[in-house]
């Protein structure tokens, strides 16, 4: 892990899409990383996908609905 943090300045965490991370895991990532290392996390599927597919619930707008026409 140390070499990874020294080689890269950023990582996207994909596993957060499928399961909520435990606080101790997130704390561990931060403690092991270098001071200026950045983490980006994908929003959990409960936020971005599931509501759209549940029957009887209002569908979320398409991501294209938020695109600028500029």
Image (spheres, rainbow, N blue to C red):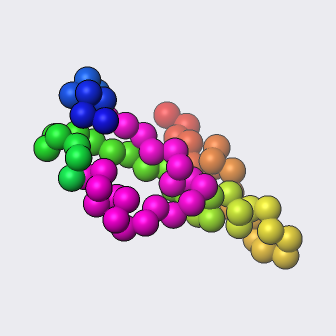
- Where is residue 52? Give x, y as percent: 74, 62
Toward the right, the furthest residue is: 55
Whether residue 6 sits left or right of residue 20 in the image: it is left
Camera-side residue of 63 and 55 = 55
Q: In this orientation, does residue 6 appear?
A: yes
Residue shown at the point (26%, 27%) measured from the top left: 3
Residue shown at the point (43%, 50%) measured from the top left: 41
**Which image quarter: residue 38?**
top left
Camera-side residue of 34 and 42 = 34
**Which image quarter: residue 46?**
bottom right
Number of numbered discs overlaid on the protein picture: 0
- Quadrant, the N terminus: top left
Residue shown at the point (55%, 37%) measured from the top left: 69
Q: In this orientation, does residue 9 appear?
A: no
Toward the left, the furthest residue is: 35
* Residue 45, magenta (yes or no): no
Whether residue 41 sits left or right of residue 55 in the image: it is left
45 w.r.t. 7: above or below = below
Toward the bottom, the furthest residue is: 56
Residue shown at the point (25%, 52%) measured from the top left: 30
- Where is residue 6? Give x, y as percent: 21, 28
Camera-side residue of 2 and 14 = 2
Q: Which residues are magenta?
A: 9-30
Whether residue 15 sits left or right of residue 7 in the image: it is right
- Where is residue 57? Give x, y as percent: 78, 74
Camera-side residue of 50 and 37 = 37
């Amino acid at each position: 892990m140390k070499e990874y943090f020294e080689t890269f300045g950023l990582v996207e965490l994909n596993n957060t899409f499928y399961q909520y991370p435990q606080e101790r895991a997130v704390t561990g990532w931060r403690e092991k990383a270098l001071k200026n290392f950045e983490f980006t996390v994908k929003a959990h599927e409960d936020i971005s996908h599931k509501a759209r597919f549940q029957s009887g619930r209002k569908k979320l707008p398409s991501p294209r609905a938020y695109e600028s026409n500029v």
